[in-house]
Amino acid sequence: MSNLHAKSFAKAKKVIAGGVNSPVRAWKSVSGIPHFVRKAKGSRIYDISGKAYIDYVLSWGPMILGHAHPDVIAAIQHEAENGTSFGAPTDMETQMAKLISSAIPSMERIRMTSSGTEATMTAIRLARGFTGRKLIAKFDGCYHGHSDSLLTKAGSGLATLGIPDSPGVPRELAKLTLNLPYNDLAYLEKAFEKYGHQLAAVIVEPVAGNMGVVPPRDGFLKKLRKLTKRDGALLIFDEVITGFRFTYGGYQNLTGIKPDLTCLGKIIGGGMPVGAVGGKKEIMESLAPAGKIYQAGTLSGNPLAMRAGITTLNLLKSKNTSFSLLAEKTDQLCLDLEKLFLKKGLPVCINRAYSMFTIFFQDGPVFDFKTAQKSDTKLFGRFFHGMLQNGVWLAPSQYEAGFLSFSHSDSDIAKTVDACSKTLKNI
Ligand code: KE4
C-alpha cells in the first residue's frame, strides 16, 4: 500500500514543487512517504488505498462539523448551479459579513479574502497605513501565513523545517518585525518601553496553535491589550484557527479582550478557500475603495465559499451549546492518553485548549516556542507513524495542533486510545 503513495508522490514531484502544494503535507519532519488522500467523511479520512483513519488534522482545522457534512455539500452543489464566480458583489457576501460581525461584535466591518495569509497580510498593511508607523511585532512560534513581514521565526511549517527566517524575505523588511517570546509579560513590558510608540500593530494567536497548542498565560493578553492601547499600536488577534473553534464566535468572546482587528479563516469557509479581516469601522474604512489602503482579490467573497461558510456558521450557531461538550471530549481523550504514556513511563506534556490539543514528547511545561522545541521530534515521528499504522491520522509535525470535530464519536475516542496503547507497545 505504501508503494501506492510512493508512486503518487513520485508523479507529483515531477510537476508540483516538492510534490505538495503546502510544505507540511510532505511529512518532512516525520520522514516517510506522505499519504495521498482519496476522500473524507465525518471523522474519517480515506487514503488512495481505501484505508480509513480517524482524522485529527481536519484539514488543519476547518472541518469542525466533520468532513463532507451533507448540508454543506448540498449547499455547495446547489450554489454551483448558479455559477462559481462573478467578480461582482452578491447579497451572500453581506449575509456572511453580518453573520460574522453579529457573532464577533469587534468586527464592525469585514473584508473577505481567499486565505488566512491574505487576511493577516491585509491586517498588517491596514495597521501600518492607519497608524503611519512601520514597525510591527509578532511572537516566536506563532504563524500567521506566509506574507514577507510575518515570515520571521514563524512557528508552523518553517519551525518544522527548521528554517527560522525564510530565504527571499528582504532583511530590510524582516527588521521591521519585532519577534517577542510568547507568554513573557516582563519581556513584553521591556519591548514596549523601547518600541511601543513606534509599533503599528502587534499580531498574536490568542491561543497559539502553530508551535503546538500553547494557551496564553493568565494576564498575557490583557497586558498586551493595555500596552497596545497605551502606546497607540493596534492589537490584531489572528483567530484563523480559533475563530468559531471554541465557541460560536472568537476566543475574544470568551476572554472579553477586544482587539482592534481580527483575522479569520478555515472554519468560516467550511472547507472552501476563505479568509477574513475585520475590526473597528474607522480602521476598516481606510481600505480601498472607501479609503486609500489598497487590498483586493479576484475570488474574495466567492459565492461557493460564501455558501459553504454561511451553511457552516448556521449549523454551528445551532450547536452553540455543544462546544463545551466538544471541549470535554477533547479533555477526556487527552486524560486517557496521558494515562497510557504514564503507564509506559514515557514523558509527555499534552497541552489542550477546548477542542485542540498537542502531545509534546517531553516532560514540559510547554508555554512558549523555546520550551516547545525541547520536544523529542524523532520520538514524535515514531509515534506519528505508529498511530497511522493503527488507523489514526495525526498532524505530521510536533509543532501543530490536533483537532476534534462534532462528528468524532465516543467510539472514535475509544479507538484512538486503543491505537495509542498498541503504538506504545512498539515505540
Ligand atoms: P492560510 O493562508 O494557510 O489559509 O492561513 C494562514 C494561517 C494564518 N494564521 C494562522 C493562525 C494559521 O494557523 C494559518 C495556517 N495554518 C497552517 C497550519 N497550522 C495551515 C496548514 C498549511 O500551511 O499547510
Image (spheres, rainbow, N blue to C red):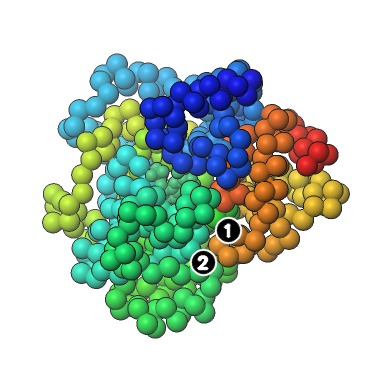
Residue 7 point in image, percent of width and height? 53, 21
Please name the residue that numbered disc 2 is placed on. Answer: 182
**Dot 2 lies on which element?**
loop
Residue 79: tell me if it is visible.
Answer: yes
Mark 1 CB near ligand 1 (8 Å cut): no
Q: Residue furthest right?
A: 343
Instruction: Indicate whether 336 appears above or below 77.
Output: below
Q: Amino acid at mark 2?
A: Tyr
Is residue 10 rendered to the left or right of residue 384?
left
Please name the residue that numbered disc 1 is placed on. Answer: 214
Residue at 77% of width from left, 50% of height from top? 338
Comparing 340 with 248, the one in front is 340
Comparing 65 with 115, the one in front is 115
Residue 316 point in image, percent of width and height? 49, 37
C-alpha separation, residue under disc 2 versus residue under disc 1: 9 Å
Which callout, 2 or 1, points at the residue further toward the start of the chain?
Answer: 2
Residue 290 point in image, percent of width and height? 14, 52
Quadrant for the N terminus, please.
top right
